Image (cartoon, rainbow, N blue to C red):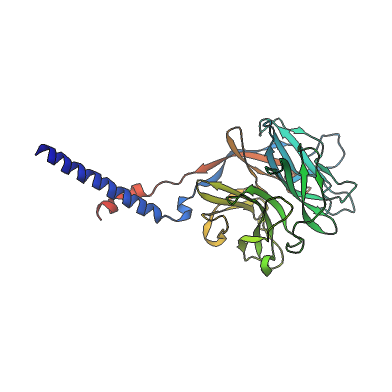
């Protein structure tokens, strides 16, 4: 009889646990994506990591930095590539005179940055090189860089390097007949389909003139699939008003960072999604961060987020590139507060 009683009590206990677990899962499944998402935030101060000017005696000009990227080489050294130029001389236009692509290296992320020779120098060429993104192309064992160039007009091109020092391009535009002339600011990642995903800001894809983030898929950086719109904002009909997309996958969710530069220069929006092919700006905007052209990087066990610019000669705006540690805030479980309602069901 005693044994029967123990079995009966045990069955009731585990039945209650099972019921509770079921209720918890039911509650969790009813949480919105905004309630389930972790919220990115800047931990502490965002500090300048290097001066935009190569050296005080380099020339008499004031210098600036803007869109950039980071990559860790095979020896563990961190590299920075980005827009790094003097403000244009008289007779040159600010957004047409981008002759240098800067290159720096560090072994600590927040300090010890060493200036290397310019990755690309167009001072005697096109006088323009734009926002870059560098990724290791596993299939050819080389570094691939997608960057904006200005030949007869603005275009995206691919540069290749074996050592992150010497770069070559065939000068061929990426999808010249399918991309709006203002398509720019690439971010690249290896997708869950095994292809390389190039994310850019644009307008006009499929005839829709809205602010857009596009994805262009490729395996070899030679042939490219048609662009897909993964985010669209109906805020204008002639140009993209956002800049610098960056996509992060974290614990099964996707976080799309982009700068709403033509609204507020240092406003970075984060939109969250379960589907990397579609981001709902109207309903799933998670947070706003301080920063322009933000890049997210992991180095030596820490995650960081950066800011840069602007391309404006005002003294207070010449801050170069700044970096802060990036945190992710887990939202409290509301289920703990609501358990009484489940017990009464």
Left or right: 100, with 211 as reference point: right
Quarter location, residue 110: top right
Examine the rendering and report whether any part of residue 51 can be seen. Answer: no
Examine the rendering and report whether any part of residue 148 can be seen. Answer: yes
Closest to the observer, 196 or 255: 196
The image shows a total of numbered marks equal to 0
* Percent position of residue 38, x then y: 50, 47
Closest to the observer, 224 or 242: 224
Q: Which residue is drawn at 68% across and 33% down?
A: 74
Quarter location, residue 213: bottom right
Left or right: 150, with 137 as reference point: right
- In which quadrant is the N terminus drawn? top left
* Percent position of residue 136, x then y: 69, 42
Q: Residue furthest left?
A: 1
Closest to the observer, 116 or 65: 116
Q: Residue at x 83, y 34 (%)?
A: 56
Left or right: 211, with 339 as reference point: right
Left or right: 8, with 115 as reference point: left
- In which quadrant is the C terminus drawn? bottom left
* Percent position of residue 205, x then y: 68, 65
* Percent position of residue 43, x then y: 56, 39
Instruction: Look at the picture and state if 164 lies above or below 235.
Output: above
């Amino acid at each position: 009889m005693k044994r029967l009683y123990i079995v009966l009590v045990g069955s009731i206990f585990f039945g209650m646990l099972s019921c509770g677990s079921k209720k918890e899962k039911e509650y969790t499944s009813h949480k919105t994506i905004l309630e389930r998402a972790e919220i990115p935030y800047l931990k502490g101060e965002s500090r300048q990591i290097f001066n935009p000017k190569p050296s005080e005696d380099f020339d008499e000009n004031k210098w600036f930095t803007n869109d950039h990227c980071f990559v860790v080489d095979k020896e563990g050294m961190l590299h920075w590539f980005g827009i790094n130029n003097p403000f244009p001389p008289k007779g040159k236009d600010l957004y047409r005179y981008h002759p240098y692509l800067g290159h720096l290296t560090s072994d600590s992320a927040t300090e010890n940055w060493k200036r290397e020779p310019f990755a690309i120098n167009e001072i005697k060429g096109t006088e323009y090189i734009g926002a870059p993104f560098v990724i290791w192309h596993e299939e050819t064992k080389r570094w691939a860089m997608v960057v904006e160039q200005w030949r007869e007009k603005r275009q995206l091109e691919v540069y290749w390097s074996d050592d992150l020092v010497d770069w070559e391009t065939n000068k061929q535009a990426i999808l010249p007949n399918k991309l709006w002339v203002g398509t720019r600011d690439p971010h690249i990642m290896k997708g869950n389909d095994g292809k390389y995903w190039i994310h850019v800001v644009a307008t006009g894809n499929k005839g829709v003139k809205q602010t857009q983030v596009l994805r262009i898929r490729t395996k070899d950086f030679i042939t490219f699939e048609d662009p897909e719109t993964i985010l669209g904002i109906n805020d204008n009909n002639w140009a993209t008003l956002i800049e610098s997309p960056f996509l992060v996958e974290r614990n099964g969710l996707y976080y799309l960072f982009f700068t709403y530069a033509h609204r507020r220069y240092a406003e970075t929006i984060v939109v969250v999604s379960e589907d990397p092919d579609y981001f709902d700006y109207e309903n799933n905007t998670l947070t706003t961060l301080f920063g322009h052209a933000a890049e997210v990087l992991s180095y030596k066990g820490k995650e960081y987020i950066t800011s840069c610019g602007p391309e404006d000669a005002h003294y207070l705006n010449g801050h170069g590139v700044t970096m802060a540690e990036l945190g992710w805030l887990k939202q409290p479980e509301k289920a703990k507060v609501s358990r009484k309602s489940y017990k009464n069901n």
